[in-house]
Image (cartoon, rainbow, N blue to C red):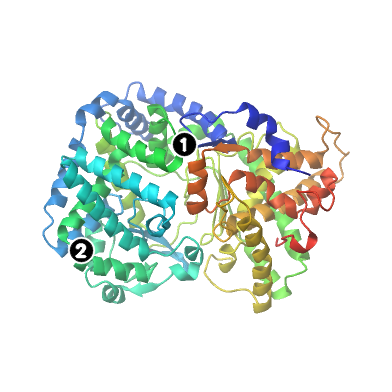
Amino acid sequence: CQDFYRFANGGWLTRTTLGPEYPSFGSFTELVERNNTTLRRIVERLAATPPRDPKTAEQKLGAFYASCVDSMAIERAGADPLKNELARIDAIASREDVAGALARGHHHGWDPVFNFGGTADFKNSTMIIAAASQGGLGLPDRDYYVRDDSTARALRTAYLEYVSRTLGLLGAAPSAADEAAQRILTLETALARASLTRVERRDPNANYHKLSLAAADSLTPNLAWPTFLRDAGAPATDAINIGQPRFFRAVDSLLSAVPLADWRAYLRWHFTRHLAPWLSSPFVDASFRFQRALTGVKEQQPRWKRCIQAANGMLGDALGQAYVKETFTPDARRRALDMVDHLIAALDDRLHTLEWMGDSTRAQAVAKLRAFGKKIGYPDKWRDYAKLAVDPRDFASNVVRAQSFAAAWDFARIGRVVDRTEWRMTAPTVNASYSPTFNDITFPAGILQAPFFDPAADDAVNYGGMGAVIGHEMTHGFDDQGRQFDAQGNLRDWWTADDAQRFKDRAGHVVAQFDAYTVVDSATHVNGRLTLGENIADLGGLKVAYAAFQQSLAGKPRPTPIDGFTPEQRFFLAWAQIWRAKATDQYLRNQVVVDPHAPARWRGMGPLSNLKEFAEAWGCKAGDPMIRADSLKATIW
């Protein structure tokens, strides 16, 4: 009742030290490391004797990993993998050449200046449309360019050093590299000033501006969209979503106003930065030095871990297929699906009994919940890598081809009907998701492992862990963003004005609570608006998981205490323990700027302060630090 996070995790926090390769470490990281052991065994077996011309997905995965761990070949190559594209960038002689270079960058998957790809149309979720959105920055957030506090200034200094050092590796003299780095920062600052904040981007309507290509061309006369689509390798289309028109007007102005030499420097930098983690050690070390300034991490991860991350990112379905064979049985999939169904039933019950919601809105909410798609463990259809060439002796070329392959796959979807069986994360991923436009929830095999989900554990632990994670993703369908999409995944207002206002009033309590939480020091606060969706999902997920847990006990003999704790107490202990974590101060300072998730301590404790079920389980009283006054409690779902 005093500090439940410390009560639940004190032993772990005392005996756990933050290893030098981690900026943060917790339950999620522990599971990632356990999965890494399995994945390493898989890829090293496949890489032991890779064929010179691999054909099957497994052979290509083995060859890709073999090329990644061949550090001698990578060191010999040095900057050679960059030469052809850098020569093309150096040949830019006109504004049209700059636009062509942007398209070529998107064709190869490194997204210069803005992001582009195929996404479900917010207002016709059955179709994939072309979509362009703000981007082009080397720092993690636009605020780092415009803030004038000591943290932002220090990070800009570290970034300038990173840019200059990298340009030096490409042959620039120190003074020329420093000057070019400053010009690159100036260009990126102009992009940042035109960008929406992360909080502004939480409003789906602020990011939906579907235009005809003619209207898009009028917005950006210096960036002809039909030509861009052709040169990027995307299909011709009659419309595009320009996510943030103000940003693209700024891009258009910069295309005409910024000297060509500055554009060449910017493109050289971003192309090199994109490939730097996969090049020889001078490039890797320059990249890591900046990560150290940003996150406080002290050492690089060993190469084999970085190569597993590369394989998961670029041949994720090949790796996932092999991972699932070893770790995720049909019975485990069935058990997870059963838990998901129990959670959906519990939320269905809660929707029927919410006092603050009117019948019209309630009917739409229930219809949306009952339309949820459920993706458990792994996709039923794996991606086909037949057209991806992999060379076991040339890692950088493998990366370029894999990223070009991914871009081509994405672009080919534009203008097609949405494939609702499509997955947006790989099977080994330790995470879960909800998609507003698909109206589905995804739980990869990677997270359906202990400590989150353990068939051998009692219901209290499973519902307090994985059950709350499942409830969290379900509640995203009804958070500040998800509630704006209907059962078919369309951006449509299905709320009465009164119910919408009541939701906003209740969400305001959540914002105020998390705005008051601090990290590192008393001046660094959690951003309650940035984290609102995740905090609503945590709060709702806990409520729904607890209700489902209680239903699982109905009609059965009451379980006896385990280790002196009742089933209800074990439920809340399981919740707090999945958020056990340690992190560097730098990591936490950056997290509150860029991450829509609150730091782990406040995810573990914040929602509990609103739950009478928690107070009852632990005998907490009004006035205890863990108990919030009734007038200040947030209850939404």
Tell me the amino acid under the disc marked 2.
Answer: Val
Left or right position of 302 against 435: left
Q: Nearer the viewer, residue 193 or 75?
A: 193
Q: Nearer the viewer, residue 505 or 383?
A: 505
The quarter in which the C terminus is drawn is: bottom right
User: Residue beneath label 2, please?
Assistant: 258
Label 1: which secondary element? helix
Mark nearest the camera among 1 and 2 is 2
Mark earlier in primary sequence (1, 2): 2
Say if 122 sits above or below 13 in the image. below
Give residue 135's position: percent from left, percent from top: 35, 58
Give residue 13's position: percent from left, percent from top: 64, 32
Snapshot quadrant of residue 233: bottom left
Badge 2 crowding class, 10 Å Cα cut-off, few under 14, some 14 to 19, many 20 or more, is few
Badge 1 crowding class, 10 Å Cα cut-off, few under 14, some 14 to 19, many 20 or more, is some
Residue at 29 percent of width and 43 percent of height: 161
Residue at 64 percent of width and 39 percent of height: 578
Left or right position of 223 against 196: left
The furthest residue to the bottom: 497
Give residue 126's position: percent from left, percent from top: 47, 65
Give residue 220's position: percent from left, percent from top: 27, 71
Q: Is residue 617 visible?
A: yes
Say if 531 sits above or below 319 in the image. below
Q: Is residue 387 visible?
A: no
User: Residue beneath label 1, please?
Assistant: 321
Q: Nearer the viewer, residue 513 or 271?
A: 513
The quarter in which the N terminus is drawn is: top right
Whole-Å distance between the Cαs marked 1 and 2? 47 Å
Label 2: which secondary element? loop
Q: In the rendering, which numbered label is found on residue 613?
A: none
Tell me the amino acid under the disc marked 1.
Answer: Gln
